[in-house]
Image: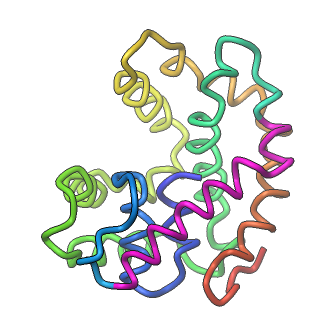
Amino acid sequence: MNHLAHAWLAGDAPAWRIGSLLGDFWRGAPDPGWPPGVAEGVRLHRRVDAFTDAHPAMAAARALFDPPLRRYAGILLDVWFDHLLATAFEARTGRALRGFADEVYATLAAAPADLPAPFRLFAARAAQFDVLAGYAERERLDVVFARLSERLSRANPIAHALPVMEALEQPLGRAFDALWVDLERLRPGGEGLG
């Protein structure tokens, strides 16, 4: 799961949302100086990632990729599954994507200033480039995959993955459906619609 899924699965508490999104930018135990909700959000992020990685639907989805993309399947699926969530966000969550994204951006803008610099940069750029709602636009995925490819230290095929993802759209959609039902149970309050 990527940013949109983590923001939703964190529930409605702003501190949990901040922590859940911070989880991609922090290694190790949460800083004891953070507000408790931020620390809990980081822990939730890690539970969601571990649960997703171990889920049979995720294993089946990774197996659909041929080498050399199979090595990067986890990264590709994180982005693709956020795309699938975004395109059916209201049906899956009962919330409009635009309203939810704006709410998250406002939460990120109010995040404590002492959080790690890479997270603060993400928080600023998320709103500037409308990252969360942008997952609904398939043409933006090419840009996301290109940026991910550039961030890796060795040559990789990620930048050219969109046609492969599109060719696998139906089986990946079924895998996401199976995974999402189970992930919603991790959300505080279990408020998801499934």
Residue at 17 percent across and 54 percent down: it is: 117
Range shown magenta: 36-61
Residue at 36 percent across and 62 percent down: it is: 22
Q: Nearer the viewer, residue 77 or 49?
A: 49
Left or right position of 127 against 57: left
In which quadrant of the rendered view does residue 143 lie? top left
| Magenta stretch: includes residue 22 | no
Left or right position of 20 against 78: left
Residue at 58 percent across and 79 percent down: it is: 95
Q: Nearer the viewer, residue 167 or 150?
A: 150
Q: Position of residue 179 (x, y in %)?
A: 79, 57
The majority secondary structure of the magenta stretch comes to: helix
| Magenta stretch: includes residue 59 | yes
The image shows residue 174, relative to residue 150, as above or below, that is: below
In which quadrant of the rendered view does residue 102 lie? bottom left
Residue at 41 percent across and 63 percent down: it is: 21
